[in-house]
């Protein structure tokens, strides 16, 4: 007797196109890099020139917020 068993067919690559309106269905903005708030835009623009200790402080504040606080 030979080595016989159940063989699975190879996985086919998906050829389904990604819809351009997928972001609308999920509620996500079309361009994820578009600032939604002027304050965020200011932070984004100034971020490269901020001292490291300021960057770490901002990150600590953001990471320290809960999901409940973010929805207010």
Image: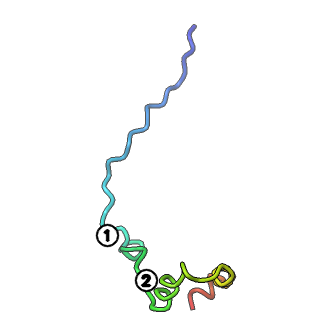
- Compared across the picture, whether 62 is left or right of 19 comes to right
The foreground one among 27 and 7 is 27
Q: Is residue 13 above or below residue 53?
A: above
| Category of crowding for the residue at label 2, using alpha-carbon neighbours closer than 10 angstroms: few (below 14), some (14–19), many (at least 20) | few
* Mark 2 vs mark 1: in front: 2
Q: Which residue is mark 2?
A: 35
The foreground one among 53 and 71 is 53
Q: Is residue 33 above or below residue 12?
A: below
- In percent of width and height, residue 51 lies at 63, 82
Q: Is residue 15 above or below residue 42?
A: above
- Compared across the picture, whether 13 is left or right of 1 comes to left
Residue 54 figure quarter: bottom right
Residue at position x 39%, y 77% from top?
Answer: 29
| Count of numbered badges drawn on the protein | 2
Residue 63 in sight here: no
Residue 26 figure quarter: bottom left
- In percent of width and height, residue 67 lies at 62, 82
**Tag 2–tag 1 contact (CB < 8 Å):** no
Q: Which residue is mark 1?
A: 21
- Compared across the picture, whether 12 is left or right of 4 comes to left
> In the rendered structure, which disc, 2 or 1, sits on the residue that comes first in sequence?
1
The foreground one among 30 and 17 is 30
- In percent of width and height, residue 43 lies at 52, 86
- The way the protein has been coloured in the rendering is rainbow
């Amino acid at each position: 007797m030979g080595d016989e068993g159940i063989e699975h067919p190879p996985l086919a690559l998906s050829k389904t196109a990604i819809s351009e309106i997928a972001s609308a269905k999920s509620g996500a903005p079309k361009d994820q890099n578009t600032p939604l708030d002027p304050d965020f835009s200011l932070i984004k623009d100034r971020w490269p020139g901020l001292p490291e200790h300021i960057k770490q402080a901002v990150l600590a504040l953001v990471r320290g917020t809960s999901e409940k606080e973010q929805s207010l």
